[in-house]
Amino acid sequence: MSLKRALVALCLVGCSCERLPEPPASVPPTEIEAPPVVTLPSTTADLPAATPALSITVSARSFELSNRALVESWPTMEREAVGRMRPLGDASYPVMAREVDDASDVLLVPGLREAVSEMRGPERARATLAHAEGITGVVAIRADADVHYARVVAALFAAGMNALDRPRLVLSSAGGERELRLAEHTRPEPVPGQIVAPRVQLAVRMTADGLDVRTADRRFAPGCATDATPGDTAAPTIERASMTPAAIERCLDAIGANTVVLFSASGALRYGDVVDVLVAIAHQHELSLATTIE
């Protein structure tokens, strides 16, 4: 374990908020680089404004991590208290930034999970304070519209492995950044005497040819009103040329309004194209993402 890591571990043990010695004046401040400039996918949907969170910015060749927006949203007293727990020589703490250089499309990016865990250090330190709100579980994914979807899934997977289980996909709009929230739909409490329709779980997979829509025991033909012909596995339920938001909504509504959608997509697809489908699905349906571990 390096000296720096040992100091970090020492500073995060227990609930002490005593001031640590200030770093020597000769130690230069840690430079926090801004995330890379990326072209976010745009949306016209009525989505909530983006909120401060630990951010993973996905570009073609790297993953940039930053907690600046999150830390700056904390009350001043808590931010200063956590700052007193900083490792020696890290004048920017609790603001942190990390970069993982990797241009692959693999699900498990070497070093990414560990980088996310390290970025959570200031939140864990804050959680030791008696009056702190603790760890949020929110992660904001910003990704260039032209990157492969597989890279976005890799970022989400690394976040999920670190208990960041409230993912947001940050998109651009005329009114500023918006966020598509995944797997956060709340279910109403049952009302005595009220009959609740069973929820239908759909598997929607996007490929270069279009969308394949099915349940555990049915695959839907174009239009989603009837089953596909047995043995016909080639034709998509919605062809790529017809894959508009309106067509997606009509298809899912034909199956049933009370649906839970488990979405997956070919990793080589352009992320910006995948987002258009995700927004259309999330407009009226509960949405979760799935991937295959090979």
Image (tube, grey):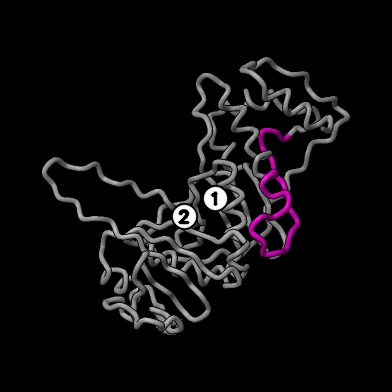
- Where residue 252 sits in the image (x, y, percent)? 31, 69
* Residue type at tag 1: Ala
Q: Residue at x 39, y 67 (%)?
A: 280
> From the viewer's perspective, is residue 279 above or below residue 139?
below
User: Is 124 placed left or right of 99 in the picture?
Assistant: left
* Residue type at tag 2: Glu
Furthest toward the front, the residue is 231
Residue linked to disc 2 = 179
Q: Quadrant of residue 223?
A: bottom left
Structural crowding at the residue carrying mark 2, measured as other residues with C-alpha within 10 Å and reported as few (<14), some (14–19) or many (≥20) = many
Magenta stretch holds residue 39: no
Which residues are drawn in magenta?
Answer: 92-115
Residue linked to disc 1 = 140
The numbered dot on residue 167 is none
User: Is 61 placed left or right of 258 in the picture?
Assistant: right
Q: Residue at x 67, y 61 (%)?
A: 106
Structural crowding at the residue carrying mark 1, measured as other residues with C-alpha within 10 Å and reported as few (<14), some (14–19) or many (≥20) = many
- Where residue 25 sits in the image (x, y, percent)? 85, 27
> From the viewer's perspective, is residue 218 above or below residue 74?
below
| Magenta stretch secondary structure, dominant | loop
Q: Nearer the viewer, residue 123 or 199?
A: 199
Label 1 element class: strand
User: Is 59 placed left or right of 173 in the picture?
Assistant: right
Dividing the image into 4 quarters, which one contains the N terminus? top right
Contact? badges 1 and 2 (CB < 8 Å): yes
First in sequence, mark 1 or 2: give its number. Answer: 1
